[in-house]
Image: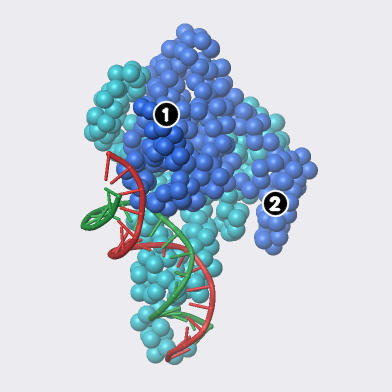
Chain colours: A cyan, B blue, C red, D green
Amino acid sequence: MTRQAETRRRRRAPLTRERVLRAALALADKGGIEALSMRNVGKRLGVEAMSLYNHVANKEDLVDGLVEIVFSEIEVAPPGELEWRTAMRQRAISVRTALNRHRWAVGLMEGRLNPGPATLRNHDSVMGCLREAGFPFRDAVHAMSLMDAYIYGFALQEKHLPFDEPDQVSEVMEIQSQSVPEMADYPYLVEVATEMAKAGYDYATEFEFGLDLLLDGLERFRAGG
Amino acid sequence: MTRQAETRRRRRAPLTRERVLRAALALADKGGIEALSMRNVGKRLGVEAMSLYNHVANKEDLVDGLVEIVFSEIEVAPPGELEWRTAMRQRAISVRTALNRHRWAVGLMEGRLNPGPATLRNHDSVMGCLREAGFPFRDAVHAMSLMDAYIYGFALQEKHLPFDEPDQVSEVMEIQSQSVPEMADYPYLVEVATEMAKAGYDYATEFEFGLDLLLDGLERFRAGG
DNA sequence: ACCTGAACACCGTTCAAGT
DNA sequence: ACCTGAACACCGTTCAAGT
């Protein structure tokens, strides 16, 4: 290919699946899932929405591609390098981190009908880690199901709860209280609101509390420890 | 009011918030969240979509109302009646049951900006149960966060996983395998697929395994037990 | 007081027509 | 081979007009 040809191409890089996915990812990260429309992705690429269908089967396929990118960002320790507990702990934290970077993905990671290689590799290596650590098959399935339920469920709470920073808690609590005039009917929620406003709320700590409780509980099911 | 007036009214019952919510609930239960449009709700009531706005502020408000109904279906034991563990276990199972009845609600239960009384009462009584059972404040918060993360995360998996009945596992696995020609690269997933096809997969058992592990773990944080 | 027709600014997707 | 204009069947929501 001549340099001229390269230059011409770069003036307006040709559409590819890769470029479509990158534009869609940026859009979703910035504006959330409701900003992710075919028309908006097109706009971001200087192209009409219909052009995208040359590189992506439909919107479902586009989201599949995005989820695959998120899975590719999750770190999984190479087999045998770490103790199962450390490896699972690191992976769980890595999933949470990735889902904080891509909040739109919460609720979309599981049950994709067309999982890509990063998705499959991730699941395979979790299962492999547990099996190699001595979990009997059924218990390894239990462990994986339990950890993923917790991780994704926690991410769901974190996505929805209205404050990002610990010190925003008190404002939010006040607004909520105003919209609920009968707050006195819920004494334990009042306690939560006032205590939270005082001491704040740290998601990372909260997440790791539950995570460690799970890992402690799972250890008992491991054979040959 | 005369009997005539009553009859006239019943010929085409007047729109109320209640009737709008009931129609919306039936629609969502039947066709999922994507069937739940203002226009479809209107259609079901023999009315134009715009009429709904006389009884519901907007779609957000409508969904708030639906979530409130789901919370009202969740059973919570009266305070002091049961041991904390039994009460929390029953409530968790009741949440899962309600979310199976209303799959569209998974992912929408948490973080509503306008929680209704059933929602608040539910949260208050969970917190109350834990506090009265002797959990220190911070640990009660941990416990509630942990349990809800697990419950909602499990419901998310259950919603997305493609089979309802244990004996549908093998078909689904086969289809999945066909769409992934390099399945041999994922030996542990192959194990899962073949074992599942043989022995099936029961969600209720799976859910209760994790639930009991959580409750066991939490017991340690309770004072005065 | 409640319902509606028309309108606005959006969706995903198809398809024939252009280059 | 790739891009697009026009079109179709949808969205949520507003508002003036009807009863």
Spot occupied by residue B189 in the image (x, y as percentages of width and height): 68, 49
Letter of the chain that mark 2 sits on in the rendering: B
* Callout 1 amino acid: Arg
Residue occupying the point 51% across, 23% down: B75
* Snapshot quadrant of residue A142: top right
Q: Position of residue A4 (x, y in %)?
A: 39, 90
Q: Say which residue label 2 marks.
A: B172
Q: Nearer the viewer, residue B99 or B201?
A: B99
Q: In the displayed structure, does residue B17 sit left or right of residue C1?
A: right
Say which mark, if any, is on residue A157: none
**Residue B204 seen from this side:** yes
Subunit ID for the residue under disc 1:
B
Disc 2: CA contacts within 10 A as few (<14), some (14-19) or many (>=20): some
Q: Is residue A206 above or below residue A192?
A: below
Q: Where is residue A152 drawn, in percent x and y? A: 50, 41
At label 2, which amino acid type do we have?
A: Val
Q: Which residue is mark 1?
A: B3
Residue at the (70%, 41%) spot, across then down: B165
